[in-house]
Image (cartoon, rainbow, N blue to C red):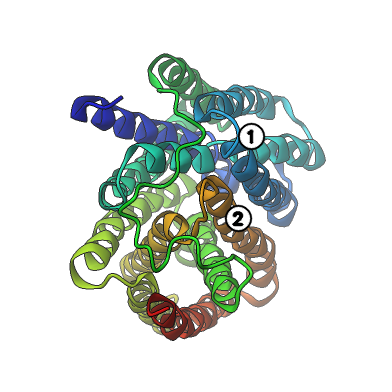
Amino acid sequence: MNTRLSLKRTVYLCAFIYFISYVTRINYGAIIAEMVADTGLSKSALSAALTGSFITYGAGQIISGIFGDRYQPKTLVSLGLVTTVCMNLLLPFCTSSAVMTAVWCVNGFAQSFMWPPIVKLLTSLLTHEEYARDCIKVSWGGSLGTIAVYLLSPALIVMSGWRCVFWVSAAFGVVGLLLWWRLCPTISMATTVKSDTPASIAGKHPLFSLLGILVMLSIVLQGILRDGVTTWTPSYISETYHIGEAIAILTGVLLPLFGMVMHYLAGLLYRKVFTCPPVCTGIIFAVGTLSSLMLVFFSSTNATVSVLFSALLNGCMHGANLLLVCIVPPLMAKGNNVSTVSGVLNACTYVGSALSTYAFPLIAENAGWSATLTTWLWVGVAGTAVTLLCVPLWKRSQTH
């Protein structure tokens, strides 16, 4: 795995696996409005599966991170893929929200065995500069997976109903598993992060320092917005503007497109303009907050404007996620613990995700979508403030 071609192949393989992980994970949230309409179960009852899966996914990130520093990424990701295929095949046969929740919680745990091992694999093979560039490509795999789900789901629902979405997702998972097992390289588990990682940062920031805590809080807040907006924008558009469920689902295509653009811009901002992740993240968070403010102003007035600002807000949170969850872990990792740090930080995203999937439908059902949009605004304000508080701590650490 020393040739440039082999490294490029590994990067694209990781991007494809990340694509598969989104196809087999966000499909439930993408079609939850259709599931509500077809099963007669309430939005809050069905969203319990999303909340539960985010909790198990977040907790699993920590376990996966620890395992990722001890066992081969090839093995861990393969186990995750096998399990998620089985859960996607099983979900359509569930008849109650409680059983759906149990199945999807297992799926969330299985999905957690993908990202930290991938980070371990890439940081073991690439320099920090290469990693900062190529992790954007891997992140695009998630955005493309989201686009695939939101484009295919309406057609599959029309042809065969919402259950078919899970079966097709499982088929994607089988393809991903076969390719991963055949093409993924093995690595030396003694490998540390590459030597060009800035010495002033690497290994000197324990996760539970003040800086670490603020970074984790920033990640929780971006997770609330990133997955909350992704999950509930189709329902918001459908219920506010009385658009059909299948058409509303298609509005979700814009969200990952904006996410891909913001991934690129965030990476460019970090590599070419600033070298301080909190500065870049604070700027992106501020843009997202302005987008949520526009959503509040234009609520219930124009569907196109609402979709565009929702997509921009969501895209900004994807950009923040790239910086906080992809770029920061190798800089904060100590020795061989990059997978552990990655797992803990990524887990914080899904603490936010769990909060959003529980709170936002309750707010929408009891106080309406206008109150929900206002909540998005205040979360954005808090995220901007917390992220900017990290800046002097991060810069001070570089002088020691």
Q: Disc 2 vs disc 1: Cβ atoms closer than 8 Å?
A: no
Amino acid type, label 1: Ala
Residue 38 seen in render: no
Question: What quarter of the picture does the C terminus occupy?
Answer: bottom left
Residue 134 located left or right of residue 316 = left
Amino acid type, label 2: Val
Which of the two residues, 255 or 323, is positioned nearer the viewer here? 323
Residue in the picture at 65% in, 49% down: 62
Which of the two residues, 357 or 43, is positioned nearer the viewer here? 357
SS for dot 1: helix
Question: In front: mark 2 or mark 1?
Answer: 2
Task: Give coordinates of residue 158: x percent, y percent.
Answer: 46, 31
Can you identify the residue that label 1 sits on? 110
Per the rendering, the mark at residue 344 is: 2
Residue 15 located left or right of residue 270 = right
Residue 69 located left or right of residue 363 = left
Looking at the image, tell me whether mark 2 or mark 1 is earlier in sequence order.
Answer: 1
Q: Residues within 10 Å of mark 2 (few under 14, many from 20)?
A: many
- Residue 290 higher or lower than 244, as above or below: below
Residue in the picture at 36% in, 81% down: 290
Residue in the picture at 26% in, 47% down: 130
Q: Residues within 10 Å of mark 1 (few under 14, many from 20)?
A: many
Question: Image quarter for residue 37?
Answer: top right
Task: Give coordinates of residue 84: x percent, y percent.
Answer: 60, 29
Residue in the picture at 30% in, 54% down: 196
